[in-house]
Image (cartoon, rainbow, N blue to C red):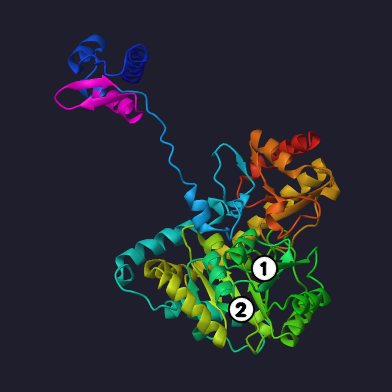
Amino acid sequence: MQHDSTEARLERHLRHHIAGARPGARLPSTRSLVAEFAVSPLTVQRVVQRLAQSGVVETRPGSGTFVAAPRTLARADFSWQTTSLGPARNSSTAVGTAISTISPDVIAMHSAYPAEDLLPLRLVRSAFARAARGRATIDRPPVAGLGDLRAWFANEVTGVAGAGASGVSADDVIVVPGSQSALTSIFRALAQPGDAIVMESPTYWGAIAAAHQAGLVIVPIARGARAPEAQALDDALASSGARLFYAQPHFANPTGTLWSPAESRAILEVARARNAFVIDDDWAHDFGIDADARPLLLDDTDGHVVYLRSLTKSVSSAMRIGAVIARGPALARIQVDRTVTDLYVSGTLQAAAVDILTDPGWRTHVVRLRQNLRERRDSLAGLVVAELGADALTFLPKGGLNLWLRFDDRVDVRALVARALASGLAVAPGHDWFPTEPPGAFVRLNFSGPRPDRFEEAVGILSRALANA
């Protein structure tokens, strides 16, 4: 401790000396500083190095250390790029609040990544260690992905209770580096710039951004606690000429809503009648709490459904692995885009994924994960109702990672979110999830990221921020 305080005192002394000196003035020598402060030459060197890195001194080998001249801010002229680049496909707010980085001290209810204690850490670490010792670190994997991993994804679909005769096999699977890049490939492969795409509203902000990036025109259809009306979808496809419908039938992000079997059948009937594709983003497959996800693919024999699933949230944020399942020419087009974009997905990641998913501990993890999510969901929902009122909670989701809140329409959500953040709570503003203007004042709360023992504190902060909004 004495060493640290002496080093700090030396640094303060030098900074004071520098503040009163002219640029180019020479600092005391290392020898004199060693003698004056009773420190080692190494300590002096560390302090001088920090001062040099901060730009207040400059060292000249063989001559000494000198006070640096004040840095001037270079002002380059980038205005030419405005004309050269032309209109942007994405706005400056294309990246949602949910992906932003915050201070560790802030209660993180804005993101949608489960906390470390909800992940299969032992399986992940063991799998990566084994994969690092194998051929996967050297060999180039097939462009469509490792056969064992593709087979696992196919079996996950066909193994669902009550599976139909969709005929899904490993040959219909493309391994992708997470669902976000897959969405961009699907949109590019199945539509042309300027084409329309129908989306639920609200829906996943990343899909909205990917559609804009692909040059598509989003046609929103309303979704509340149920699926969009089949007639509304039919009207949207007919009036816009769209052939793509992006949807999250199971535990949608951000709302947590779930399509019923009857609603799913009605949506598929519209797609068949309109020769359209339904892009089923099954992002929350492993997060069913009171219900299970049943992919639309099971009731599709003619290739109208393009199925998307990711492992990132249920395994680890480092496991950027997912899968696209499609049939017919659509599969070929998506594969071409994936190959051109990334060539292939890391074999090491794929080998580790196979190791995790085929371990008996994986199923145990999923069961335990769902139990933990139920406890977290119920705890946070109870606090929201007690503190903010029953009307604030739109409904209790049967799965997923989030609660979807609605406040008085006069509430300024952006100001509310800013006030909460200033008080130590990060929440996601609802407007990030609407392709067009939001019809109310919404906020998304994630219950899988922060520690449950901070839920009460978080709701208290939100309540106080709401009172000032």
- Where 158 sits versus 135, above or below? below
Residue lying at the far top in this picture: please name it. Answer: 36
Amino acid, disc 2: Val
Amino acid, disc 1: Val
**Which numbered disc covers residue 306?**
2
Q: Is residue 52 magenta?
A: yes
Per the image, label 2 sits on a secondary structure element best described as strand
Structural crowding at the residue carrying mark 2, measured as other residues with C-alpha within 10 Å and reported as few (<14), some (14–19) or many (≥20): many
- In the rendered image, which quarter contains the C terminus? top right
Q: Position of residue 355 (x, y in %)?
A: 43, 70
Structural crowding at the residue carrying mark 1, measured as other residues with C-alpha within 10 Å and reported as few (<14), some (14–19) or many (≥20): some
The residue carrying mark 1 is 217
- Where 238 sits versus 398, above or below? below
Rounded to the nearest angstrom, the CA distance separating label 2 from label 1 is 19 Å
Q: Is residue 230 magenta?
A: no
Residue at 69%, 57% (x, y): give it: 433
